[in-house]
Amino acid sequence: MYYFGKENWRTLERGIEKEWLVTNGIGGYASSTIVNLNTRKYHGLLVAAHNPPGFRVLHLTKLDERFQAGSCTYNLAANDNRSGFAEYGCIHLQQVSVEPIPTFTYSFGDITLVKTIFMAYGRNTTIIHYQARNGAEPAVLTLVPLVNCRGHHYITTQGEINFTQQLKEGGVSIKGREEIPPLLLSSSSGGYIPGDSWYAGMAYAAERERGENPYEDHYIPGRFEIPFAPGESKTFTVVASTEDIDNLDGEELLAAERSRLQGLARQAGYDDHLARRLVRAADAFIVERRSTGKKTVIAGYPWFADWGRDAMIALPGLALVTKRFDDAREVLLTFAKHRRRGLLPNAFFDGAREPVYNAVDASLWFVHAVYKYLNYTKDLDFVREQLYPVVKDIVHWYMTGTDFNIGMDSDGLISAGSPDIQLTWMDAKVDQWVVTPRHGKAVEINALWYNSVCILNMLSSMVGDSPAYPELPARIKDNFIKCFWNEENNYLNDVITTDGPEDGLRPNQLLAVSLPYTMLTQAMARRVVQRVWQELYLTYGIRSLSPFDERYQGVYLGDRLRRDGAYHQGTAWSWLIGPFITAYRRVNNYSPESRVQARRFILPFRDQLRDHGVGYISEIFDADEPAMPRGCLAQAWGVAEVLRALVEDVLEIRPIEETSQYRKTDW
């Protein structure tokens, strides 16, 4: 449980720094700041996923409360407006707790109101649960819904949508766009009074900061009024849904959701407090994909969809460390089903008939995920029947050549891309500007390639086949050292191009140390880790470029041009802390001292879970101190890799076979 008091919203600027998020297991979500002042176009009480996990639509933006007791009116709403008028309802906010279900306690006069917001798992339904105790005067609680009907990436202006409403028992059905289901609103107490107006010019500070349109209008269809007698207490719920809401019991649904989240922590079985919190955070990212009828991974909230690279990197932390093995199988099958010419999808985008495949590393991360799955589950039958053929297919296509100039060169190394195509995870591009050109032979791609061939050979032996390519690993290893080791700088070059090596100090080389099969000597590996620690480590992640590089950008702010220009040119990434800690322990022979230091690397994330996205780990951080959190407020591979490193490298809970494999080197 995370608790916040008035010191966190003494000013609106402080109050909007922290955001809450709840999800529904099919890609939908609800989110705002802890003072319930929306600062993003993505904030809302019901963002429904109509084609899970995509086609996400904002239906209910807010539900603003006003409490009139006798002659006094208490406005609990918090809003910023283009006109300069702001509502400061957070002055009545006494406490906020997040578990990750958020609860807000308001205290004003002799009245207390407690509001809890959650989503029904597997449904496009948000429940706002109220407990109110009135004071000595007769009172009326007015709830004003602000409604919309648009894709969560967009903005609505007044008159753009012709809303209609139809009264229902206990509430109302509100229809916006023809192709989108209506919003159903109901209250278990009081009555609904129809109206027809607009809230004009809601201002979004975060969008202004991002160089986006910061103003939006929302439709107000009417209001709910709940009367209170003097001294009366009431418990009731408001339900917002795009599905049938008859016979929904808010109390039962709240108890069920809390029980489900507690069950996930029990299933994982960790006593460590931070691990249990991260297990609960991991749940938000494992969602249904309707096109396959199986699970997939949302890369980050609020704006990302499911990405192949992110899903495969995150899978061990999200689904294996947490012992969600059925989910792990489904995620692997989801992406395996969509492979094309040896390539896994880079991403599934809303509105696209087919996924896009412009990623050189997603397939190689899939092979690594298969290795981790087998170590955790010992499920050789499933691997033999479902995954082994996919691994063979991937390696075959990478050897013979596939799309985007991806293929094995005569030296056994993988080359990929062209000057105008970004295929690695450092893929920022603004119009025709490729921010981090990495075409050619990238260091992490070839570390993953070496691991993929070694894993295929291992699997071949396990299923009774002859090793697929017994001599290839040695050739890859010899040429990798020749091409990538930079003796002058004591680290690995980042990319080898036709013009020679690109030797900027970047974190990609960590994978040549952290992956199960390493090509480096212990001396080389130690130097790599030491240089990364010295220049790239930044408390909550690893910088994407050395501060001593002339291309370095220390702050991730501004419009898209400025942000993308910094995205991989210094900005620190939370997910990289996982490979860093694993590499650190490995080069130090898993000594007791290295375990103590690994815990020091992990412990700051206890505080990060209270910042930005409460209960989650942020996507990125400014490369300059004080390392402000930026980007997605909840990122799958950030949560996953911190959890994996905590469990495997700090708590030292990992499969026995994997422990011996990681220790089995030429050192």
Image (cartoon, helix red, strand yellow):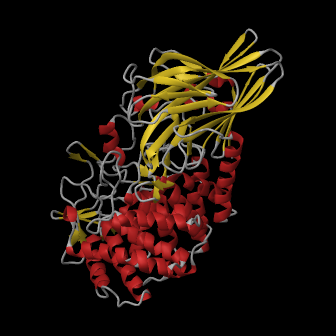
Closest to the observer, 566 or 139: 139
Closest to the observer, 501 or 183: 183
Q: Position of residue 595 (x, y in %)?
A: 59, 69
Q: Residue furthest top?
A: 71
Q: Quadrant of the C terminus?
A: bottom left
Classify residue 101 by image quadrant.
Answer: top right
Closest to the observer, 78 or 415: 78
Closest to the observer, 652 or 239: 239
Could you tell whether 250 is left or right of 48 in the image? right
Classify residue 324 by image quadrant.
Answer: bottom right
In the image, what residue occupies the spot 35% across and 70% down? 448
Could you tell whether 327 is left or right of 490 in the image? right
Q: Is residue 627 depicted above or below 145 in this figure? A: below
* Numbered disc total: 0
Q: Position of residue 147 (x, y in %)?
A: 50, 27
Q: Position of residue 384 (x, y in %)?
A: 43, 80
Q: Position of residue 316 (x, y in %)?
A: 50, 66
Could you tell whether 640 is left or right of 361 in the image? right
In the image, what residue occupies the spot 49% across and 76% down? 374
Q: Is residue 440 visible?
A: no
Q: Is residue 387 visible?
A: yes
Q: Is residue 492 depicted above or below 138 in this figure? A: below
